[in-house]
Amino acid sequence: FPSIMAASFLVNMHYSFLFICLSSILAASLGFTVDLIHRDSILSPLHNPTKTHWERLHDALRRSTSRARYFDVSASRAMVQSPVIAAKGEYLMNISIGSPPLILLGIADTGSDLTWTQCKPCVQCYKQRLPLFDPKKSSSYKKIPCGSPLCYTNLATKTCNSNGDCSYYYSYGDKSYTNGVLASETVTFGSHTPSFPQVLVGCGYDNGGNFNDKGSGIIGLGGGALSLVSQIKPSIGGKFSYCLVPFFKTSLVGKISFGPEALVSGSGVVSTPLVKKSPSTFYYLTLESIGIGNIEFDYRKRSTSSNTKSKYAEEGNIIIDSGTTLTLLPEEFYQDLEAELKKNIKAEPVEDPEGIMSLCYKNDADMDVPIVKVRFAGAELELKPSNTFVKVQEDMVCFAMIPANEMAIFGNLAQMDFLVGYDLEEGKVSFKSANCSHLQF
């Protein structure tokens, strides 16, 4: 079963966005492609060579369940806050802010909107290796007044400081936080791309928690109005896409593309609507069913609980997230999938000693698994075995979907080797099967 053997290296598909090579600027409309690097890759500044493959894998699996809990809390509160554990640095994005530009290496977060960095003079700041941003040295830095519509229409938690500036406070899932002022500033992605003036960013003077010293803030890539993607939306036509490569290919990188080039098209493309819900930060899709072999399970009708049935029958019943490793599904629906898999897989079942994965087998090169098909509204994806099973120990493979009581999430193991495109103008997400290691942008 070579595909499952390959899946053993899919340790933690929480990729790091390192904006290294920017190219392909179209004359009529802005477009650029950049490197997409796994956070545990040897090319990542967060790579920890002292950790084993299995330690990195189990770190990733634990983060999947934690991220789901914070998605659920955020959705129920309808608050604009990040559900990620910022200390883990799931993604890194290298951009520059200010005039002259200063490099900001931030956690790129599809689950939050505000882009912020630590600023001088710090009242309380965590240690960082990069120089602190000094707004006094930037000719393009402008603080937003407290009474401005840019303040009270964009921030969920805001106050006025003694100088009449628009102040914000954001907290994250691991109790990390940032407190500062909202400002407009020039953002650039590299020396070969145009600058984006008057982008709203946060200048943090009081920040703490478990942030990594290699980073200097967070870059918001969510769907809300304040996110970086939304603010440059007119220039990129509201389009971006990514392709996730297997982690074991440490010398290669995936790609994320913005602008016209990000349109996913051609033979084999399927698309599903993005559903607008609160909070607008998250990217909601409608899951209709999952098939195991020839048996299809209706996602919207299985639950016997009236509350759960209502929750999962509605449109926008699952979040697509490139920052969560596993796919998380409601308990009753998951049990149906697991029962069918058990009927079809002829291998020795074993228990995950970490207690994270629900369905595991003793690794066998001859192990055969049924085809798994995920059907969203208008789009059906046929997942490869490497999308559905992952090797968690040398002698053990596990189903990469788990039961959860929190928000349902379509994770990145399921998205591996698909070109995934977001078209915010048309309100849809498109998928195309691809070999991301060889895909040319």
Image (cartoon, helix red, strand yellow):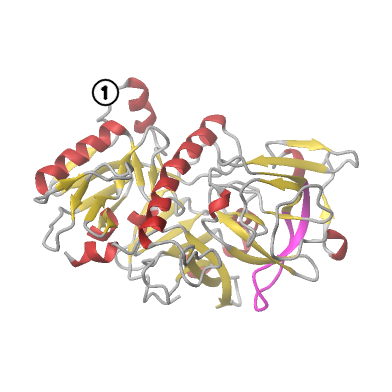
- Residue under label 1: 304
Report the side of 163 relative to 283 (left or right): right
Q: Residue 39: x, y in percent?
A: 49, 62
Residue at 46% of width from left, 64% of height from top?
A: 50
Q: Residue 340: x, y in percent?
A: 15, 41
Q: Classify the position of the N terminus by image quarter.
A: bottom left
Compared to 441, does 353 lie above or below? above
**Does the magenta-highlighted stretch encompass residue 103?**
no
91 vs 375, nearest the viewer: 91
Residue found at the very far right of the displayed protein:
163
369 vs 268, nearest the viewer: 369
272 vs 369, nearest the viewer: 369
**Range of residues picked out in magenta:** 181-200
Which of the 4 image quadrants contains residue 267?
Answer: bottom left
Report the side of 83 relative to 185 (left or right): left
Q: Residue 401: x, y in percent?
A: 30, 46
Please identify the dominant SS of the magenta region: strand
Q: Callout 1 environment at 10 Å: few (<14), some (14 to 19), or many (20+)?
A: few
Query: How many callouts does the rendering have?
Result: 1
Residue 354, visible in the rendered structure:
yes
**Does the magenta-highlighted stretch encompass residue 183?**
yes
Residue at 61% of width from left, 56% of height from top?
A: 212
Report the side of 56 relative to 178 (left or right): left
Compared to 353, does 239 lie above or below? below
Residue 149, visible in the rendered structure:
no
Element carrying mark 1: loop
Q: Classify the position of the C terminus by image quarter.
A: bottom left
Residue at 26% of width from left, 60% of height from top?
A: 386
Compared to 68, does 259 lie above or below? below
